[in-house]
Amino acid sequence: MAKETEGYSKLMLWHSMYGNLPKEVGGTDIRDYHPVRYTDEVRALFKDVSAFLWEIKVTGRPLPDDAIMEEPLLKAAEELGVKLPLDGGFITARPIEKSPYYDAKALEGVPPVVKK
């Protein structure tokens, strides 16, 4: 992971995970969601990403229909007495000023992402 993030500041990495993006560029109140279950939305995302990667020849074939095996997850949840999908699992988008790495002086003169 260190090589992939080399050259990025801690603020940039924080913003990529938690930062509030402008609505004009597709920003939403929920930055990420982890339902700990293969919901229809998760399955559709896997299928779309797989088709894209196959189309650009990154993978040798699209995702097989039987690639997602939910049974081990469901069995573990049952043994632990956990009801899926989990309540919560949301990462809400936050203003950059809420970052522990935010430094207003360091950002002086930096233009906003979206100009009105």
Image (cartoon, rainbow, N blue to C red):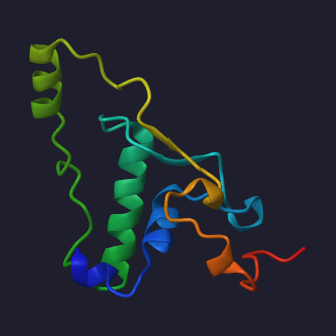
Residue visible at 11% across and 23% down in the picture = 75
Q: Where residue 73 sits in the image (x, y, percent)? A: 16, 32
Q: In the picture shown, does residue 54 fall above or below 100? A: below
Of 45 and 32, nearer the camera is 32
> Is there any visible trace of residue 48 in the rendered image?
yes
**Residue 16 drawn at (x, y percent):** 49, 66
Query: Hey, which residue is sitting farthest front in the picture?
Result: 105
Q: Quarter of the image holding residue 25? A: bottom right
Most extreme residue toward the right is 116
Q: Is residue 26 above or below residue 44?
A: below
Image point 35% across, 26% down: which residue? 85
The answer to whether residue 58 is visible is: no
Count of numbered circles in the view: 0
Q: Viewed as shown, does residue 76 lie left or right of 82?
A: left
Q: Quadrant of residue 82?
A: top left
> Quick check: 85 left or right of 81?
right
Considering every residue shown, the one lying at the far top of the view is: 81
**Compared with residue 34, is residue 101 higher up or lower down, i.e. above or below?**
below
The foreground one among 79 and 105 is: 105
Q: Quadrant of the N terminus?
A: bottom left
Q: In what quadrant of the picture does the C terminus appear?
A: bottom right
| Residue displayed at 60% across by 70% down | 103
Residue 102, quarter of the rendered image: bottom right
Please say if 37 is above or below 106: above
> Does residue 97 appear to the left or right of 52 in the view shown?
right
Give me the residue at 17% from left, 48% from top: 66
